[in-house]
Every structure is written in C-alpha cells, then in structure tokens.
C-alpha cells in the first residue's frame, strides 16, 4: 500500500514525473486514513516541522518590529542629544506615578500571558481562558491610563501640530526652570517623539488585544488545549515583544533627569 | 552508508530543540525580578549620577528585556537558529544606531 | 553521453500537456484569487507586475519625449516632476523589488528545495493582495494629480513645501513594503526549514542563495523605510516636526533613515537577478558554476555590506562603496570562469545573460567612479548617475528578469516560445538599451543635471539619440509580451526538461502538479551535477517508453 505525499521513500532517486509516469502511478485513494494530526498542514512533513517553522516565522516578524521601532529610537537618540534641556522639561510633564503603574501593569500582563502559554501546554482549557482574559483586562487598564495621559496632554496644550503652546515652558507655573524661547520650541520635538513612540506602541497593544479577543473565544472552544498550541505560543511572543518596547520607552520618556 | 533515521536527522539540525515546559515558579521569579528592577530604575532616576543616569537606565532596561526574552519568550530553551535570529535582529538595530551616530558625532554632536 | 542535443523537445506529433497540473486542478476566478498554491500566486504576481511595468514605462516614454527638445515645452516643469517621480516610484517599488522574487522566486524556490509549497501559503497570498492595494494607492496618487517629490521623498520638500499627494503615495509604498517583507519572511523560513532530505545548504541552487540573501535585506531593511514614511505622513498630516527644521527637526535624519533601506534596496533588486544568471549560465554552458562557495558567500556578503554602505556620509561612504563592489565583481569573475571551456549555446535566456554580464559590469564600474569622492562632486545629480543606475537596474536586473522568464517559461506553462522571435527581441532590447543609456553617461559627464525638463541646447543631439533608443527599447519589451502570450496556446510542448538543466524543478512535469512532487524527493547529488543528469537521462530512456 502506498500512502501519498509526505512519507519519504528512502531508496528511490528523484524520477522525472511527466504525464506518462503519473499515468502509471498508483491512484491516490482519497479515502485512505490520513495518519496525521488534523492540524497538520499538508505542505509540512511533521507537526514538529510545522511548529518550528511557524515559531521561526513569528521571530522573523518580530525582527521587522525591532527595526520598525528602531527608527523611532534613532530619532530619539539624536534629538535628546541636541535638545537635552527641552527633553528634561518635557519629560517632567509626564506623570511618573502613572508611568510606573503602567509599567507594572504591562509586566503583570506578560506574566499572565506566559501563564496562559503554560496552561495551553498543560491542556487546561479554563485556566487558559482565565489567563487570556486577565491579559486582556491588564492591557485594557494600560490603554485606559494612556488615554487619560493623552487627554491631559491635550488639555495642557502639549500636542504638537494640533494645539501646541510653549507657554508652559517659557513661563512655567511649577518648579521647572524657564526655557529660552528657542529651546522652549524644541519641546515640540520631544512631544512629537512621545506621541509617535507611545502612539505606535499603543496601536500594537490595540491590535494585540483584538487578537486576544479572538483567541479567548477559540480557546473556550478547546482549540488550543488538544496539543496544538502554536498559535498561543506565537501570540505570546508578540505580546512579550510589545512589553519589551515599553520597558525601553518608560525610562527614555518618563525618567529623564528626575533628580533635578 | 545507511540513511540516518528521522530522529537522528533532526537532532543534527540547528533547528532542533528539546520540548521544555517552563514552570510557573520560574515565571513568578522573573516577574518578581522585573518588578524589582522597575522600582530600581525609578529610584535611580532620582539620584544625581551625572553621565551615568542614562547609562544606568538603559542598563536596567536591557536587563529586564533580556529576562523577558530568555524566560517569558523561551529563548533560553530554543534552538540555535532561533537564538541566532534574535541576535541578528538586535545586531542590525545596533548597526542602524551606530551608522547614524558616526555621522552626527563627526559634525553635530551636543551642539545646536 | 551526448551533449549534442541540448533542446530536447518531445516529438511534437504526439506531444501533449500533462493531464493534471496546477493550472487545471481547479477552475474559476475564486480558485485563483483565494489560492494558496505558490505557483498560482506567482502567476498572479507576473500579470500584475507586467501591468505596473507598462505604466512605469509609459512614464519613461513621456520623459524621453519631453527631453527631445531643450525647452520644457511638452509639459510644465511641475508636471515633469510628477512624471519622473511616478516613473521612479512604480519602477522601484512596484516592479524591480518584487520582480524576480515574487514571480520566479515564488514559483521555483519551493520546488528547488524539494518542498510542496512555501512555509506560509496564506501569508504569500496576503503578500500579493498587499501589493495590489499598494498599486491602487500609487495609481490613485497619479490619477488624483500626482506627486512630485522624486522617488526619494526628500524632506523638507516632501513634508512642508509641496502641495501634492505625498501622503497617498507614501502610504502606497508603506503597504508595498509589507508585501515585500512577507515574501522575504516566507522565503527565509522555507529555505531553512523545508529542504528535502539530502538537500543540504551547499547543494542548493545558487538562485536560492541569492534570494535568501535578498530576503534577509527585505526583512531587516524595509521596516526602517516603513517607519520613515509613517513619520513623513504624520508630519504632513498633523504637523509634528520630526524632519522640519522650523520645528527643530533635522532633514538629514530623514536621509539616514531613508537610505538605511534604500541602499540595501538596490541589492534586494539585483541579488535575485544574479541568482537567475547563475542558473542560466550554468545550464547553457553545461558546466557547474565556478566557485560555488564563493558565489554563495558573496551573495550573503553583499547583503551584510549593503547595510554598512547606507551611510551616505563622505569618507566612510567612499571606502565602503569600493568594498561592496568586490563581492559583485567576484560573481562576474565566477560566471566568466564558468563559461571558460564550457559547452556554450545561445538560447534566448543565455543571450539576456550575456547582456547582463556586459551591461552590469559597465554599470557597476561607473558606480565605483561615483564612489570616489573627487569624481562624485563633479558627477553627482547629473545624468551620469541616471545612466549608472539604469545600466545596473535595466541593463542588469531587467535583463536578468527577462532571462529568467524565458528560462522558466517552459516549466511554468508547459510551452516553448518561438525561438527566432525571442532572439530578435533580445537583440532589439540590447541595442535599444545601449542607444538609450550610453549617451546619458556622456551628457551627464558634460554636466547635464538630472530631474530637469529643460537643458542647454548643446546637449540636444545626445538626448535625441537617447529617445530614439528608448523607442527601440520599448519595442524590445513589447515583443515578449506578444509572443509569450501567443505561446500559451500555440507554443511547442516543452516537456519536463527542455534545457537539460539540473535542479529539482526540471525533474518534474511541465507545468507542475499543485503539490509539485508525488513523493518527497531524496537528494544525493551536488548542484549543477551534469554527470548525474546524464546518467538520469540514460536511466529514463531505458525504463520509460
């Protein structure tokens, strides 16, 4: 009995497979039992190959994300060096309390995501759903706090291009030093980078939470607790990466020279 | 020459790695460490360390990132290929930073 | 063992296409638009890329028409700016970058490594749809009134001073970038993880190595372009000032970020073409590529070096530009050494390959002139640069693309094209190309600036020659469109291996089955092993028919 496709015939060389050869091949029997897992895609030989390939693919995608955010970090590096006083004052406009809370929230969400992956590996359906829901809730808290911060920036006229005013920097009402006008104008560059970097990060969070909602529904149906949890694993990689981006954004944006 | 078995073939490949399930205890420890480092970085920002302020901040951030990558993202238990891929990504990012810096340092560093 | 009969077509009286293939496995528009089959996606790409090529070519035609006369009389200078911008954007992002990887690479790479498909067929299809959306955005920018920044989007011109559809075009390129990233990602995973048993890295055809190197560049470089375009769009849309000097930004930062992609991009464009040339030269000299390892490693070296040359800052640039020419030169030497004492025949793919070798060498050498600081000061922003990159991209890359299309056409369609007509087209293209672009070296050296609709009258003769050449070149490109389409119905049946080439793709039927192989192949011979092929053919003659 010959089975089709993926079983290797070790003693045969490559043969030209023209129409004559095909005509003399044994007919592929559609009713033969496919002796493989239902989630194995036909272009892969084994489940292990499929899992390793999809994990590798996800890592390559994360590489593109490193380079994508990398451009923003490069811009930040240059401008922080050029306009340091403006960056200090700009950074002090952000709430260190909210920033720290958000950092803690994201680290918690990474923990809950990792526990979700563990539950999938252990084939515990309700635990998996629970951990995924916890991750969604924590992500939502993060975005909620972020929205509040953005709102505050809008109120205080710190949004570049839309309603920016240098008043707070040339004539500060708090304990900050007053900046000369040209340096005060450079705070716009700081806030441009603030919104670009946290905005891009938040967009990635929104996409992540949307995918999580889909995953929760499918996890409830038992899709990931039967031995095939590659999707959860790979999504976990994405979620942890988004956390890592924030791990760098927090000190770079919130903690510039807080000792002054 | 006998053909290697599938298992032997896979063992020799750089993409092969053992199935390793990381325990919740490890996750918990890493979580704790990350929280401690977060507190550290906030605290350090209130200290007057001159040029070392940004250096300490980046160093702590890198440490946290490494912990997440190694344990939450399972790189410690991954194949050689995956480790190499991650390294390649960060290397290219460093190339971008360095190349841009060499231009700016040579003509416009710290001056405006 | 006979090498006398190279083109071994089946006896035409009884020849017929295989009963089952990827072309007739399913019928209907939906089966094509929702396919996961890498071969069908390659055909989809081929059709759409050809479409955009002709739009970009029409733009080129308009440029050459304008430049017939010294005055800017055919169109206003603003319109001229829009025409050459669109020509650049379409040709670079919608033609050159995807050409070989998305059409030939998609079709052939899974078969070359011995797999049934790429690692992620759905991502492959998504890649094509992203390409189409990108094309729609770009054509919209054209139709809505055009964009006139030049394909390089230089700030602050693009962010602040121009009133044209920069955002639409920028978004189009952003989307095209992701199409490219997904193709590259797919190739890398496939090449690493889906090689058949026995297909070690150093048994892979060099076409695979070249596309692998290009894919690394796609994955690592394109995202930087993406973020740069996002920042340009944001700056235009809501006025954040990352590149705007008035707001404290630095236009040079744009240049650093833009060229971090755009210089490796030229290697993304040329490396797959070089892969084609390796295959074609080996096949039509019946000889293993000389220095396989050197060619394989030089492909990766070009990719790595490419990132380091992106720093377009004086001193470092000069040195590194010289260095990056070295791996490219290594390849030319290796191909020449392959030809030496080979059994050379002059089929159409080989004619294009010869054209490539000569024209790419000239183009590449002029790149070294441009890398020399003193010369660059004189030559920069002149037609010398225009000629340089057209020699490498059109004389090089486009010829390689045509070479590859002709080489793998029998495999993709099961049919041969008319040989005499195709040779005529190749010759026409070569003559037309030289007539178009060689005068541009001269006129650039004499000082004619690029991107200008008007020029001093003493340059007119050379410009007229160039336009005349462009007409001939256009005919040369139109002919394959016609006879390749004709061949789909009336071409001779090709059989599985009309070129007697090595490589797994020539061991299966033409056109291939959807699943490529009936059984997983087991590879036990090196690449370009013509002796193995000869034994194979004898064995086949004994057991079949």
Image (cartoon, coloured by chain):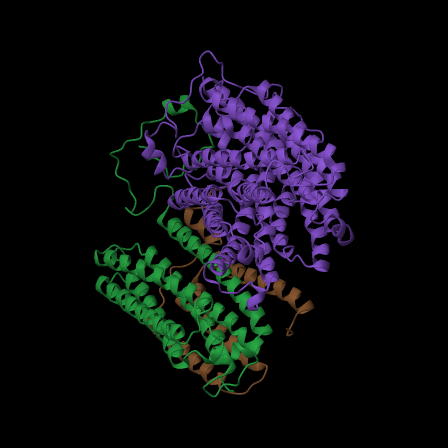
What residue sits 73% from the left and 39% below the top?
Answer: C441
Which of the image's four quarters has the C terminus of chain C? Answer: top left
Q: Which chain is brown?
A: B
What residue sits 66% from the left and 31% below the top?
Answer: C467
B61 on left or right of C339: left
What x and y, as percent, mark residue B103? Answer: 66, 64
What x and y, as percent, mark residue C533? Answer: 55, 28
Residue in the foreground of this view, choosing between C147 and C367: C147
A146 on left or right of A170: left
- Chain A: drawing colour: green
C421 on left or right of C103: right
Residue farthest to the top, as pictured:
C13
Which of the image's four quarters has the N terminus of chain C? Answer: top right
- Chain C: drawing colour: purple
Above-or-below relation of C126 to B48? above
Question: Is residue A226 in sight in this rendering?
Answer: yes
Above-or-below relation of C8 to A177? above
What x and y, as percent, mark residue C529? Answer: 59, 33
Residue in the foreground of this view, choosing between C223 and A161: A161
Numbered label tally: 0
Residue in the foreground of this view, choosing between A182 and C296: A182
Q: Quadrant of residue C131?
A: top left
Residue in the foreground of this view, choosing between C378 and C240: C240
What x and y, as percent, mark residue C4? Answer: 62, 19
C418 on left or right of C328: left
Question: Is residue C249 in sight in this rendering?
Answer: no
């Amino acid at each position: 009995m010959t089975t089709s496709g993926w079983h290797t015939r070790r003693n045969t060389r490559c043969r030209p497979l023209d129409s004559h050869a095909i005509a003399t091949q044994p007919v592929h029997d559609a009713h033969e039992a496919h002796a493989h897992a239902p989630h194995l895609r036909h272009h892969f030989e084994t489940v292990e190959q499929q899992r390793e390939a999809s994990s590798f693919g996800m890592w390559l995608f994360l590489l593109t994300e490193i380079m994508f955010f990398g451009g923003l970090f490069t811009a930040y590096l240059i401008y922080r060096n050029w306009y340091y006083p403006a960056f200090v004052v700009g950074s002090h406009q952000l709430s260190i309390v909210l920033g720290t809370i958000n950092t803690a929230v994201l680290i918690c969400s990474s923990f809950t995501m990792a526990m979700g992956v563990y539950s999938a590996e252990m084939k515990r359906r309700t635990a998996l759903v629970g951990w995924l829901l916890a991750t969604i809730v924590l992500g939502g808290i993060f975005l909620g706090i972020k929205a509040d911060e953005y709102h505050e920036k809008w109120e205080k006229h710190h949004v570049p291009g839309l309603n920016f005013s240098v008043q707070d920097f040339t004539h500060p009402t708090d304990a900050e030093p007053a900046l000369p006008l040209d340096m005060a104008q450079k705070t716009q560059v700081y806030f441009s980078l603030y919104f670009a970097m946290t905005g891009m990060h938040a967009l990635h969070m929104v996409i992540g939470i949307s995918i999580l909602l889909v995953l929760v529904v499918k996890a409830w149906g038992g899709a990931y607790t039967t031995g095939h949890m590659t999707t959860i694993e790979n999504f976990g990689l994405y979620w942890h990466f988004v956390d890592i981006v924030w791990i760098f954004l927090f000190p770079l944006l919130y903690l510039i020279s807080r000792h002054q | 020459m006998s053909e290697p078995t599938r298992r032997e073939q896979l063992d020799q490949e750089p993409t092969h790695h053992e199935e390793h399930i990381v325990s919740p205890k490890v996750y918990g420890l890493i979580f704790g460490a990350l929280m401690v480092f977060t507190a550290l970085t906030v605290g350090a920002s209130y200290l007057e360390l001159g040029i070392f302020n940004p250096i300490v901040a980046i160093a702590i951030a890198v440490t946290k990132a490494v912990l997440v990558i190694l344990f939450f993202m399972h790189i410690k238990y991954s194949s050689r290929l995956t480790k190499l891929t991650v390294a390649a990504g960060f290397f290219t990012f460093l190339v971008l930073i360095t190349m841009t810096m060499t231009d700016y340092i040579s003509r416009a560093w710290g001056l405006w | 063992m006979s090498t006398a009969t190279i083109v071994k077509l089946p006896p035409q009286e009884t020849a017929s296409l295989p009963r089952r293939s990827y072309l007739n496995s399913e019928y209907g528009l939906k089966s094509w638009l929702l396919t996961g089959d890498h071969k069908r996606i390659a055909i989809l790409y081929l059709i759409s890329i050809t479409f955009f090529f002709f739009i970009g070519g029409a733009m080129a035609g308009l440029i050459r028409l304008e430049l017939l006369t010294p005055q800017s009389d055919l169109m206003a200078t603003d319109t001229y700016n829009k025409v050459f911008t669109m020509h650049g954007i379409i040709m670079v992002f919608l033609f050159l970058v995807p050409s070989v990887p998305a059409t030939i690479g998609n079709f052939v790479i899974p078969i070359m490594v011995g797999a049934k498909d790429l690692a992620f067929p759905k991502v492959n299809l998504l890649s094509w749809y992203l390409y189409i959306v990108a094309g729609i955005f770009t054509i919209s920018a054209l139709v809505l009134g055009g964009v006139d920044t030049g394909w390089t989007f230089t700030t602050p011109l693009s962010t602040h001073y121009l009133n044209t559809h920069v955002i639409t075009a920028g978004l189009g390129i952003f989307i095209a970038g992701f199409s490219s990233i997904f193709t590259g990602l797919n190739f890398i995973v496939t090449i690493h993880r889906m090689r058949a048993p026995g297909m070690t890295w150093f048994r892979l055809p060099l076409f695979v190595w070249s596309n692998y190197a290009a894919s690394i560049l796609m994955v690592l470089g394109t995202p930087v372009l993406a973020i740069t375009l996002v920042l340009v769009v944001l700056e235009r849309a809501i006025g954040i000032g990352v590149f705007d000097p008035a707001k404290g930004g630095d236009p040079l930062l744009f240049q650093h970020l833009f060229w971090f992609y755009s210089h490796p991009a030229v290697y993304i464009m040329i490396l797959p073409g070089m892969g084609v040339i390796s295959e074609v030269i080996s096949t039509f000299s019946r000889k293993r590529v000389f220095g396989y390892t050197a060619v394989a490693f030089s492909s990766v070296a070009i990719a790595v070096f490419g990132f380091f040359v992106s720093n377009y800052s004086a001193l470092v640039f000069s040195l590194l530009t010289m260095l990056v020419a070295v791996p490219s030169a290594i390849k030319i030497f290796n191909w020449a050494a392959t030809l030496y004492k080979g059994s050379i025949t002059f089929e159409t793919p080989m004619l294009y390959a010869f054209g490539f070798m000569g024209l790419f060498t000239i183009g590449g050498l002029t790149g070294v002139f441009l890398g020399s600081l003193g010369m660059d000061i004189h030559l920069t922003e002149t037609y010398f640069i225009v000629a340089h990159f057209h020699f490498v991209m059109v004389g090089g890359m486009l010829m390689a693309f045509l070479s590859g299309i002709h080489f793998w056409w029998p495999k993709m369609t099961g049919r041969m094209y008319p040989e005499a007509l195709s040779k005529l087209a190749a010759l026409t293209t070569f003559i037309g190309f030289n007539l178009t672009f060689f005068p541009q070296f001269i006129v650039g050296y004499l000082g004619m600036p690029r991107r200008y609709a008007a020029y001093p009258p003493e340059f007119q003769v050379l410009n007229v020659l160039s336009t005349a050449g462009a007409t001939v070149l256009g005919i040369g490109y139109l002919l394959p469109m016609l006879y390749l389409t004709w061949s789909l119905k009336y071409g001779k049946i090709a059989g599985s291996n009309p070129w007697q080439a090595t490589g797994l793709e020539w061991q299966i039927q033409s056109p291939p089955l959807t699943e490529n192989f009936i059984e997983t192949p087991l590879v036990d011979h090196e690449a370009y092993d013509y002796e193995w092929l000869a034994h194979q053919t004898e064995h086949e003659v004994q057991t079949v028919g």
